[in-house]
Amino acid sequence: MKILLFARIRDQLGIDSVDIDKPSTVAELRLLMQRQFPDHSALFEDGFSLVAVNQEIETTGARRLRESDEVAFLPPMTGG
Amino acid sequence: MIHVAVQTQDFSVAEAYTQLCEGKPDVGAAVFFVGLVRDRNLGDDVSQLELEHYPGMTEKSIEAFAHKAHERWPLIDIHIIHRVGKLAVQDQIVFVGVTSEHREAAFAACDFLMDYLKSQAPFWKKERHRLENGKWQERWIDQAEKDTRALQRWHNPVDESGV
């Protein structure tokens, strides 16, 4: 599945999305991303980034993911 | 009514104000806030800001918070314009306008919406600033604790919804 990357996360990885095998949950997604990008694993830790599923922030790691979900990693918001 | 726009182009405060008030005889108070790019942040000169958003999610998120404000205070209209893309010093970034019959609700809702926009809305800010050696550097801005704290003051014991 395609994972969208925004702002600092996109800049540090140099890509705006990544295709990975669909993880079963948000928590597993974080682990997969840390494994795929070991030099930038801090970006995918629970304490730093937010995960949006279908454009809503998902705070539950156990949330199950479906192939059709739109999933994105967001750094902490700093706008306004 | 709630109006939300996320756009690269500049906006006219006069036009937004007119839209909020014209033909609305029940409006007794109009409060608005305009945020501008200032020339210094954390002691550094800033020449340019770049604001990024998540198209679709950002608009939905702002609308959801505007609805919370509408539920919490007796408001007439909310008008929010947020710019994205490259902005220079003195450029307008954000407009939040709120109307109500009496001023208390409009003042409070405008303040609340700005605290939300600063801390929870999906925007990311990148700054270009000049180093001591004269070179320019880009940096993503970290979340300000002050802004997160500011939103917390709207929590209250009788309302567990976070607004």
Image (cartoon, grey):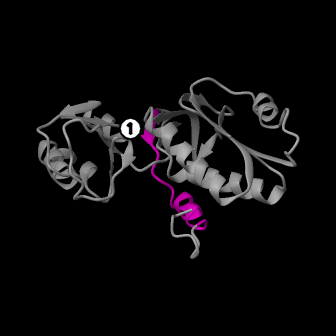
- The amino acid type, in three-letter code, at marker 1 is Ala
**Is B152 on the left or on the right of A64, as rendered?**
right
How would you rate the neighbour count of disc 1 (Cα within 10 Å): few for under 14, some for 14-19, many for 20 or more? many
Q: Is residue A69 magenta?
A: no
Q: Return the residue nearer the eye: B141 or B158.
A: B158
The residue indicated by pointer 1 is A7
Residue at 58 percent across and 40 percent down: it is B45
Q: Chain of mark 1?
A: A
Q: Is residue B52 above or below residue B144?
A: above
* Magenta-tinted stretch: B136-154
Q: Is residue B144 above or below residue B122?
A: below
- Farthest residue, direction top: B9
Q: Secondary structure at mark 1?
A: helix
Looking at the picture, how far across and down is residue B77, in whole percent? 72, 43
- Farthest residue, direction bottom: B157
- Residue B124: in sight, yes or no? no
Looking at the picture, how far across and down is residue B125, in whole percent? 49, 40
Q: Return the residue nearer the eye: B114 or B106.
A: B106
**Is A38 on the left or on the right of B60, as rendered?**
left
Looking at the picture, how far across and down is residue B136, in whole percent? 47, 32
- Quadrant occupied by the C terminus of chain B: bottom right
Q: Quadrant of residue B3?
A: top right
Residue at 47 percent across and 53 percent down: it is B143
Q: Quadrant of residue B33?
A: top right
- Quadrant occupied by the N terminus of chain B: top right
Residue at 39 percent across and 46 percent down: it is A56
Q: Is residue B134 above or below residue A29?
A: above
- Residue B121: in sight, yes or no? yes
Q: Is residue B148 magenta?
A: yes
Residue at 88 percent across and 41 percent down: it is B25
Looking at the picture, how far across and down is residue B108, in whole percent? 72, 58
Q: Quadrant of residue B111?
A: bottom right
